[in-house]
Image (spheres, rainbow, N blue to C red):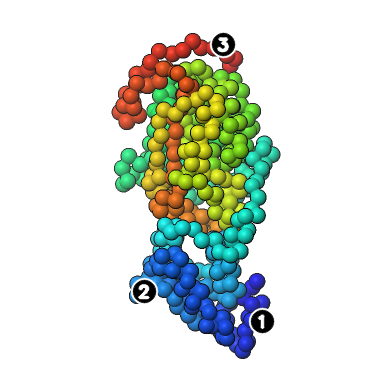
Amino acid sequence: MSGRGAGAQGLISGRRRARIGCVRLDGALDRLAPRLLGAMLRRLGEPPVRFDLCGEHSVGGGEAPLATVRVRDRGALARLLLDPDFQFGELYVAGRIEVEGDLVGALRLAFRVPRHAGVAGRALHALRRRLSHDRRGAAANAQHHYDVGNEFYQLWLDQRMVYTCAYFPSPEDGLEEAQLAKLDHVCRKLALRPGERVIEAGCGWGALALHMARYYGVRVRAFNVAEAQVRLARELAEKEGLADRVEFVLDDYRNVGGRCDAFVSVGMLEHVGRECYRELGATIDRVLAPGGRGLIHSIGRSRQQRLSRWTERRVFPGAHPPTLREMAEIFEPNGLVVLDVENLRRHYALTVSHWLRRFEAARPRIDALVGPERARTWALYLAGTQASFEASTIELFQVVFTRIGNDAIPWTRAHVYTGEPARFGPAPDEVAAGPL
């Protein structure tokens, strides 16, 4: 309902203020609005956040609020109170809610208390359907996220276009250095050796595949369902003279074939769908050599919880950050065993803070490219993501695994941090396999 419609239906006097979208609060709502807003703030632990309704009411925040949330019309207030978990994002994108001050800080405070969906939100959550993750559904979900175009991402990612958590040996490192360090961190965890065969599932724009081939001497087949990403990755492989060692395949991970010494997936599991974890594990089991190793890098949770309805609908359809217990469904039924788990949550919070600064610096170009509403959607998504990692409501897991009973693995973790060659145990007999 627009502010104009709300005013026509609900105001006793019908008087309007000069400011855009603002209405004078009279009657019952004039009395109830401060109470309703105050109750919502109490549910959030009374954070130093002020709510302002068209200049008529100011609730909470104290003398020096971290941020001021300006609700521009009566209809927006009603929607916010009924279903804050979803409607805050909708109203922010529409410009009916504005935030002055520290948006990330305000969201971080909100995320540190139990999530409150509101009356309507709880009902809608119960009816919320899960999107399909079959081959067609997976491609459609990816298209929703990446149809914004490569140019959009080039405006705020690093020069290699790595759209996953960076690794900061020092918090003072820049984003370019930290993303390069992440690529090496993954390669060292896999203990890659020249001549090995690698399969990558969900390769983005190809940065990891190209890095593995160039600096670790391996051959890579990288799979992805996002056509724009694969097209650019192939162009980069040709430009860098690596097309004979890296093959980018426009296909679903379930169609992976051949044999590999290492299997890696960075930033794909969030989109696989929990109901497909065993299928992913079966795919790994089918292609991984007896002495092979693997690594899965994924946003996750410390406890089971679905993604927010707003993020799932507007940004990441079908996404699900798994717990470690849920991730075990990939390994345990398929003869795979976990060797190492690392949580890089703080690294991802810092990564997103870099992305958000770059995004805001490029905001005029982004507005022109995708439109102001879509730009606000992404700005809110990035701010909320940073706040979520800082509040530890989401985590970032890197899980290294191999086959049960395989001793052809590094003896210690020293190679991950020193760069020295890994010391391997004896390899099991290799099974005859076709080409990668």
Which is in the foreground here, disc 2 or disc 3?
2
Camera-side residue of 410 and 4: 410
> Residue 212: x, y in percent?
46, 28
Looking at this rendering, what residue extends furthest in the right direction? 136
> Residue 188: x, y in percent?
39, 28
Camera-side residue of 82 and 376: 82
Query: Of marks 3 and 1, which one's residue comes earlier in the chain?
Result: 1
Amino acid at circle 1: Ala
Mark 2 surroundings: few (<14), some (14-19) or many (≥20) residues within 10 A:
few
Query: Of marks 2 and 3, which one's residue comes earlier in the chain?
Result: 2
Q: Which mark is residue 432?
A: 3
Position of the C terminus, as image quadrant, is top right
Q: Residue at x 54, y 83 (%)?
A: 30
Q: Is residue 131 visible?
A: yes
**Label 3 – label 1 distance at C-alpha:** 76 Å
Camera-side residue of 248 and 429: 429
In the picture of the structure, the residue carrying the numbered disc 2 is 62
Amino acid at circle 3: Ala
Q: Are marks 2 and 3 in contact (CB under 8 Å)?
A: no
Query: Of marks 2 and 1, which one's residue comes earlier in the chain?
Result: 1
Q: Residue at x 61, y 46 (%)?
A: 318
**Label 2 – label 1 distance at C-alpha:** 33 Å
Q: Judging from the image, what secondary structure is the residue with disc 1 in?
A: helix
**Label 2 – label 3 distance at C-alpha:** 71 Å
Q: Judging from the image, what secondary structure is the residue with disc 2 in?
A: loop
- Location of residue 134 by image quarter: top right
Which is in the foreground here, disc 2 or disc 1?
2
Q: Judging from the image, what secondary structure is the residue with disc 3 in?
A: loop
- Location of residue 103 by image quarter: bottom left
> Residue 139: x, y in percent?
65, 40
In the picture of the structure, the residue carrying the numbered disc 1 is 8
> Residue 124: x, y in percent?
63, 58
